[in-house]
Amino acid sequence: MKWYDEAQRLVGTREIVGPRHNPTILAWAKTLGAKMLGISITDDETPWCGLFVAHCMTQADIAPPKIAVRASSWQDWGSNLRADRLSPGAVLVFKRPGGGHVGLYAGEDATTYHVLGGNQSNMVSITRIAKDRCLARRWPTGVPVIDGPVWVDTKGSISKNED
């Protein structure tokens, strides 16, 4: 999946601490624009998980939802995907204190999804998030699901509040 390949390529992209901002993240926002994102993003301090997923989808010529910067906007985007049909690149939407989070399915273990996402510890990374926090599992409408669930070893801490 072209969008998932793009996401993997960007692992390690991170915010810049202080008054400077990562030009890569700002370029995604500039390319997508305020009309698509729902707001104008001028720094890498703005929550950018939705921006990251929107950028990846547009690289595959797949339109993101309106107000794509909001994680909750992805909840009704595309087509619903049952948990037993998950495949790398599926969009996962989570609840978290103070808002939501969106990322891409990379795998799972018994209790967590391994999520490839932006703004996870202020960078693009793979993070474990509890399955019971998942609100929606989505897939681009009209795109066939080729693979199935990926089971991975349990390792690493479980994220409680992505930022």
Image (cartoon, rainbow, N blue to C red):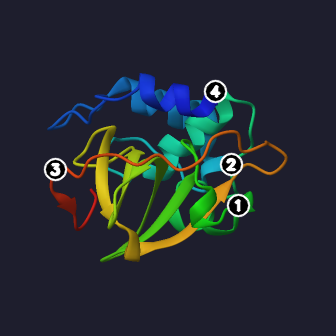
Mark 4 lies on residue? 2
Residue 48 located left or right of residue 66:
left
For label 4, the SS is helix
Question: 10 Å neighbourhood of mark 4: few (<14), some, or many (≥20)?
Answer: some
Q: Position of residue 106 (x, y in %)?
A: 44, 44
* Image depth: mark 2 or mark 4 in front: 4
Residue type marked 1: Trp
Q: Position of residue 155 (x, y in %)?
A: 18, 49
Q: Earlier in the sequence, mark 4 or mark 1?
A: 4
Tag shown at residue 77: 1
Q: Position of residue 88 (x, y in %)?
A: 54, 42
Residue 20 located left or right of residue 85:
left
Question: 10 Å neighbourhood of mark 2: few (<14), some, or many (≥20)?
Answer: many
Residue at the image point whose x is 16% and y is 50% from the top: 156
Asked if the residue at tag 3 contacts the one at tag 4, i.e. Cβ–Cβ closer than 8 Å, the answer is: no
* Image depth: mark 3 or mark 2 in front: 3
Q: Earlier in the sequence, mark 2 or mark 1?
A: 2
Q: Please identify the quarter of the rendering in which residue 163 is found.
A: bottom left
Q: Is residue 99 above or below residue 37?
A: below
Q: Quadrant of the N terminus?
A: top right
Q: Earlier in the sequence, mark 3 or mark 2?
A: 2
Q: Earlier in the sequence, mark 2 or mark 4?
A: 4
Q: Position of residue 99 (x, y in %)?
A: 39, 73
For label 2, the SS is loop
Residue at the image point whose x is 75% and y is 31% from the top: 61
Distance CA(mark 3)–CA(mark 2): 30 Å
Residue type marked 3: Gly
Distance CA(mark 2)–CA(mark 4): 14 Å
Mark 3 lies on residue? 156
Mark 2 lies on residue? 64
Residue type marked 2: Pro
